[in-house]
């Protein structure tokens, strides 16, 4: 399955493999502590966010969820 | 199939031959909330087989339509809920779908799916015709969805068998090699 950004497909595949294994072997069995896929996800995300902006896909606010939640920047 | 199998398959639903128009899936966000539920926000890209002459007129970038999907998996209560809505053509139509997978209350080892869709068409004249058409498509898609998951489950099982067979083969080879060395 491809990514919306063609350049991101390989990063996506690596992340997907990691996630699918963790999901079936750990998460569904109740061991959700520790996410081994964090790094892969971050790299994949950077690529996807860029592709979404480039293709002008109308996603509202979704890119602001996740790890950056709770960070507020005050600029004056 | 048991709930865990169905949920695992649902996370890997695409690609499958019943949904050939889905050409891209991306995870936009994923996190576990305070109550231990896994939230995923995904973007699905679909391509509807528009004739190439139309594509050459309007440009290939504009032939993709997008759907956003939010799923929540509760591993304790064993529920998976998927909500999706179109983000393309929202000025014309909005299709909101909700699917919930739970273990069957009476038959262990089976999963029950409830599915609903709300379609709204903006504008008046064609609305009842279009809504009827889409309602039919959505209910036949519901069957397709079940077939799609069946296909994914079979594929995952075949992968496991293949992996086990090759692992066995590797073990036999290394045992034979060890026996040879010992002589």
Image (cartoon, coloured by chain):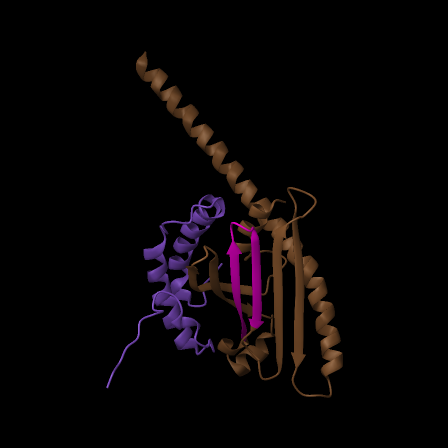
Chain colours: A purple, B brown
Q: Residue B22's spot in the image, x, y percent?
A: 56, 64
Residue nearest the viewer, comparing A44 with B8 = B8
Reply yes or no: does residue A71 show up in magenta: no
Residue at figure coordinates x 36%, y 53% from the top left: A37
Q: Which corner quadrant holds the C terminus of chain B?
A: top left
Chain part drawn in magenta = B64-85
Q: Is residue A68 left or right of residue B38?
A: left
Residue B12 visible, this orientation: no
List the single residue furthest toward the front. B35
When the figure is inspected, residue B9 is found, relative to residue B142, above or below; the finding is: above
Q: Nearer the viewer, residue B178 or A24?
A: A24
Q: Is residue B82 magenta?
A: yes
Q: Quadrant of the N terminus of chain B?
A: top right
**Residue farthest to the top, as pictured:** B183
Report whether B32 appears left or right of B23.
Answer: left
Determine the main secondary structure of the stretch shown in magenta: strand
Asked if one can make out residue B179 in the rendered structure from this viewpoint, the answer is yes
In the current view of this chain or complex, which residue is farthest to the left?
A: A76
Residue A56 pos. (x, y %): 44, 79
Residue depicted at x 50% and y 80%: B59
How many marks the image carries: the answer is 0
Of residue B88 and residue B34, the one placed in the foreground of this image is B34
Q: Quadrant of residue A4?
A: bottom left
Identify whether B37 is placed above or below B127: above
Q: Position of residue A73 (x, y in %)?
A: 28, 77
Q: Position of residue B96 (x, y in %)?
A: 61, 71
């Amino acid at each position: 399955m491809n990514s919306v950004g063609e350049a991101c497909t390989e990063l996506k595949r690596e992340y997907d493999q990691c996630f699918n294994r963790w999901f079936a072997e750990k998460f569904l069995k109740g061991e959700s502590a520790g996410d081994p896929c964090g790094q892969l996800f971050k790299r994949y995300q950077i690529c996807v966010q860029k592709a979404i902006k480039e293709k002008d896909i109308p996603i509202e606010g979704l890119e602001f969820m996740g790890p950056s939640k709770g960070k507020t920047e005050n600029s004056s | 199939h048991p709930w865990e199998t169905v949920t695992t398959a649902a996370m890997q639903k695409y690609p499958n031959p019943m949904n050939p128009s889905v050409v891209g899936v991306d995870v936009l966000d994923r996190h576990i909330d305070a109550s231990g539920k896994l939230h995923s926000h995904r973007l699905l890209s679909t391509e509807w087989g528009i004739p190439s002459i139309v594509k050459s007129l309007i440009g290939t970038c504009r032939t993709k339509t997008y759907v956003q999907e939010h799923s929540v998996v509760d591993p304790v209560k064993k529920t998976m809920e998927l909500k999706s809505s179109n983000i393309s053509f929202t000025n014309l139509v909005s299709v909101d779908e909700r699917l919930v997978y739970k273990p069957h209350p009476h038959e262990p080892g089976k999963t029950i799916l409830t599915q609903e869709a709300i379609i709204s068409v903006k504008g008046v004249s064609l609305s009842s015709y279009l809504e009827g058409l889409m309602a039919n498509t959505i209910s036949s898609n519901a069957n397709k969805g079940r077939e799609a998951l069946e296909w994914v489950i079979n594929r995952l099982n075949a992968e496991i068998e293949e992996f086990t067979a090759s692992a066995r083969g590797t073990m036999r080879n290394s045992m034979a090699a060890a026996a040879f060395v010992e002589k």
